[in-house]
Image (spheres, rainbow, N blue to C red):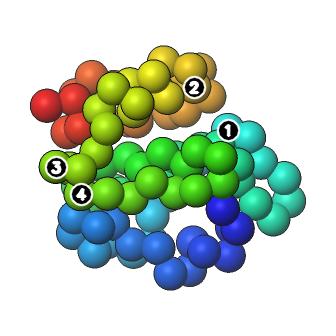
């Protein structure tokens, strides 16, 4: 994902902009793995293979997200990895 996309990305659930960006694997201009976080609704959206996966709750792949979190738990903030986050429900 090109970092310049941060100017236009908004949470698909509540339209909050801007989102917070947490980079796991990146270079100067792009993020290949990481997470976007909405401060209003406390949802995260993973970035995998350079693609932000920003789907509404009913279309999210919870198993894939849990694998992503397990793999990157030491590189992401607690507000994303915490079991109290809404996507765990």
What residue sits 74% from the left and 40% below the top? Answer: 25
Which residue is farthest right? 28
Crowding around mark 2 (Cα neighbors within 10 Å: few <14, some 14 to 19, many 20+) is some
Nearer mark to the viewer, of 2 and 4: 4
Disc nearer the start of the sequence (2/4): 4
Q: Residue 72 carries which label?
A: 2
Nearer mark to the viewer, of 1 and 4: 4
Disc nearer the start of the sequence (2/3): 3
What residue sits 29% from the left and 67% below the top? Answer: 12
> Which residue lies under the disc numbered 4?
56
Say which of 56 and 6 sits in front: 56
Cα separation, mark 3 vs mark 1, equals: 26 Å
Crowding around mark 1 (Cα neighbors within 10 Å: few <14, some 14 to 19, many 20+) is some
Percent x, y for residue 83?
Answer: 27, 22
For residue 64, above or below residue 45: above
Q: Quadrant of residue 65?
A: top left
**Left or right for 45, reference 20:** left
> Which residue lies under the disc numbered 1?
24
Crowding around mark 4 (Cα neighbors within 10 Å: few <14, some 14 to 19, many 20+) is few
What residue sits 45% from the left and 54% below the top? Answer: 53
Cα separation, mark 1 vs mark 4, equals: 23 Å
Q: Are marks 2 and 4 in contact (CB under 8 Å)?
A: no
What residue sits 33% from the left and 26% below the top? Answer: 63
Disc nearer the start of the sequence (3/1): 1
Q: Are marks 2 and 1 in contact (CB under 8 Å)?
A: yes
Say which of 28 and 32 sits in front: 32
Percent x, y for residue 20?
Answer: 49, 58
Cα separation, mark 3 vs mark 4, equals: 6 Å
For residue 25, above or below residue 88: below
């Amino acid at each position: 994902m090109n970092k310049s996309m941060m100017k236009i990305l908004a949470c698909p659930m509540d339209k909050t902009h801007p989102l917070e960006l947490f980079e796991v694997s990146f270079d100067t201009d792009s993020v290949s793995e990481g997470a976007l976080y909405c401060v209003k609704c406390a949802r995260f959206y993973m970035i995998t293979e350079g693609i932000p996966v920003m789907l509404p709750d009913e279309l999210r792949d919870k198993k894939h997200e849990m694998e992503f979190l397990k793999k990157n738990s030491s590189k992401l903030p607690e507000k994303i990895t915490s079991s109290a986050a809404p996507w765990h429900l």
